Image (tube, rainbow, N blue to C red):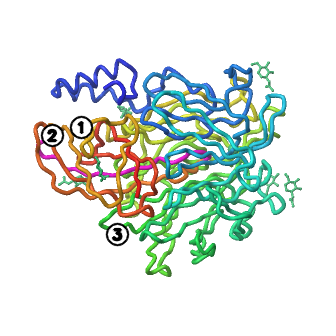
Amino acid sequence: MKRSSFLIPAVSILILLTVLFPNVSSASKKEFKDYEILKENSGINAMHICLTAPDKMLIIDKVQNNSIHLPDGRPVSTLEYDLNTGKKRFLSLQSNTFCSSGGFIADGTLVSTGGAEQIPDKHFKAGFSALRFFKPCQNDKCKWREDLNGMMTHRWYSTSTTLSDGRLFILGGSKVSIAVNNKTMNNPTFEFYPRTDPTPIDFPFLIETLPYNLYPIVHLMPGPKDQTLLFVFANKDSILFDWDSKKTVHKFPRLEGASRSYPLTGTSVMLPLRPEDNYIPQILVCGGNEKNDTKHEAANSCGRIKIDLSNLDKAKWEIDDFGGIPRVMPDGVILADGQILFLNGAKTGIAGYSSKLGKVKNKLLKADNPDLTPVLYDGQKPKGKRFTKLNHSTIPRLYHSVASLLPNGQVFISGSSPQSDVTLSGVKFPTEFRIEMFSPPYLSSNTARATIKSVNGSKKLNQGPIKVKYNKHIKVDVELSDKKANFTAAIVHYGFITHSVHMSERYVFCDIKNIKRKGNGYTMDVVMPPNGNIMPPVPVYLYINNNGVPGETAVHLHLSK
Ligand SMILES: *[C@@H]1O[C@H](CO)[C@@H](O)[C@H](O)[C@H]1NC(C)=O
Ligand SMILES: *[C@@H]1O[C@H](CO)[C@@H](O)[C@H](O)[C@H]1NC(C)=O
Ligand SMILES: *[C@@H]1O[C@H](CO)[C@@H](O)[C@H](O)[C@H]1NC(C)=O
Ligand SMILES: *[C@@H]1O[C@H](CO)[C@@H](O)[C@H](O)[C@H]1NC(C)=O
Ligand SMILES: *[C@@H]1O[C@H](CO)[C@@H](O)[C@H](O)[C@H]1NC(C)=O
Ligand SMILES: *[C@@H]1O[C@H](CO)[C@@H](O)[C@H](O)[C@H]1NC(C)=O
Ligand SMILES: [Cu+2]
């Protein structure tokens, strides 16, 4: 019980009481506060995060003047945070991870890609072409392994995306750390990990989209097994790219209005994929700014495009507002029920520091008027009815802040570091180490939450991912008192999260067959998606929802051929 709950002990006891005495549930449910600030903070800035186990958040900062140190005296730049206990396990790296990217590969290893310049006085090497490998483990012993020249070129602010074959596609970036990309420093190429080509491969789209094209948005296109297509968006433009033939196969119309890429940073999510819609994708791009201007109001707009590959000429952007709130540097988190939570960021300005890295404190703010109010987006509703404003937070989350869904349906929120180095006081927006657990509205619903008891015959849940295969039916047993249960099932990959880009984030609904009442619950067959283009062969979490309310905890699975 304790393992699957990320709450402070007092709340855990209430949850336990709920399980033992379901009738007191309405009393305990009120304990899901909208924002709970955890007792233990992150210790370093959560510039990049990635859930590597159901209760382990891997946090990656840049190399900066953190007050916690490794045994060798260097500042900690990465650690594993235990969501149950708040314990931090410090990890060591030799290279600078400043503004890097990452993603999982088929064997379940997280690969961190790129970074920035060396920091000689802190004994960190350049991370521009580094690859770093983290293979999650059950014994708290796993460490980073590094290959300082694992990539063929320098990549700062590049994007990594897991492909259907379980490789990583690493795109773009600049050759140095830079306030706005330019022709000289641009790296308009891509490469794969594991490497298959002798040189980086040209990607002219990243020349056409200068200067606002860093951290390009990439979504793996769902489709048949041997399809090899990516949707790539930068600035205001987007294409379909075939990574096998290495050719652009379609150019979409321009998304008019704001620029959406760094430093005029917006965000993007692919809406949940549904078997009943033949997995036809719809992509949402929201926020950003029209002008490279620290005082200019951010964009209150979103574009949404449906991409039916059999009728590409019909793919047009539909413009919506952004829930009535202008927002630059938003995070887009697909929640357990498939709705999208947009949060973090600011109402005015752009991303970045105002001064050169490591020199002066940021007196001149690049962004201001923090967006404390998240908006919820229901993609199934008609335009004009999709957004709802939620309760506001009290903590500004500006440049270098993050958010991720968790297996228990809550959202992990951390970071904010708009200064060039750790600055805890004397500035309007200090470096922020506090972690918030946000409870979406479904956690205050009165609907009973299912508890998954076994998956494909295994009762050993969330102690390492359970291997499952594409296209197969897996038997899932749940405990649930509700006699009129209304189930949906989904598998979710949270991805690698940094700078408003949720790399490889993906939500796929699964068909359910043969639902039967069994004991004090149900048994059912959940159908895994057909192939790696629907969900790549990576670690995912299985959610069983009742009337859209997620179960007590999702279960860690690993899809493979
Ligand atoms: C949202 O805020 C209102 C007013 O402060 C409060 O009554 C309500 O409980 C909050 N919702 C949640 C889920 O905490
Ligand atoms: C780093 O922090 C130490 C104290 O923790 C302080 O003395 C030093 O000035 C800081 N360095 C920079 C570059 O901010
Ligand atoms: C590109 O940026 C670099 C680094 O900031 C700068 O030195 C260079 O002059 C810029 N080049 C152009 C063509 O703007
Ligand atoms: C963006 O604005 C900054 C000042 O904030 C300026 O130094 C820079 O040249 C501008 N870049 C472009 C491409 O307009
Ligand atoms: C269920 O587990 C068995 C081994 O116990 C395995 O052979 C089978 O492929 C698994 N089913 C799925 C859907 O992965
Ligand atoms: C079942 O739950 C879904 C939400 O997940 C809802 O849209 C649907 O209306 C519900 N069906 C019934 C019969 O209540
Ligand atoms: Cu950055």
Three-letter code, disc 1: Lys
Vertical position of residue 429 compared to residue 496: above or below? above
For disc 1, the marked residue is: 453
Q: Position of residue 246 (x, y in %)?
A: 63, 72
Q: Is residue 430 visible?
A: no
Tell me which numbered mark, 2 or 3, is placed earlier along the sequence.
3
Q: Magenta residues, as a range? A: 482-499
Q: Quadrant of the C terminus?
A: bottom left
Tell me how far mark 2 sits from mark 3, CA to CA. 30 Å
Q: Residues within 10 Å of mark 1 (few under 14, many from 20)?
A: some
Foreground: disc 1 or disc 2: 1
Tell me which numbered mark, 1 or 3, is placed earlier along the sequence.
3
Q: Is residue 540 visible?
A: yes
Magenta stretch holds residue 449: no
Q: Which residue appears at 34% of the width and 22% of the height?
A: 11
Tell me how far mark 1 sits from mark 2, CA to CA. 9 Å
Tell me which numbered mark, 1 or 2, is placed earlier along the sequence.
1
Out of 401 and 362, give the one closest to the viewer. 401
- Cβ–Cβ under 8 Å for marks 1 and 2: yes
Foreground: disc 1 or disc 3: 1
Q: Residues within 10 Å of mark 2 (few under 14, many from 20)?
A: some
Three-letter code, disc 3: Asn
Tell me how far mark 1 sits from mark 3, CA to CA. 30 Å
For disc 2, the marked residue is: 521
Which structural element holds mark 3?
A: loop
Q: What label does residue 278 carry, if any?
A: 3
Out of 20 and 438, give the one closest to the viewer. 20
Which structural element holds mark 1?
A: strand
Vertical position of residue 468 compared to residue 57: above or below? below
Q: Quadrant of the N terminus?
A: top left
Which structural element holds mark 2?
A: strand
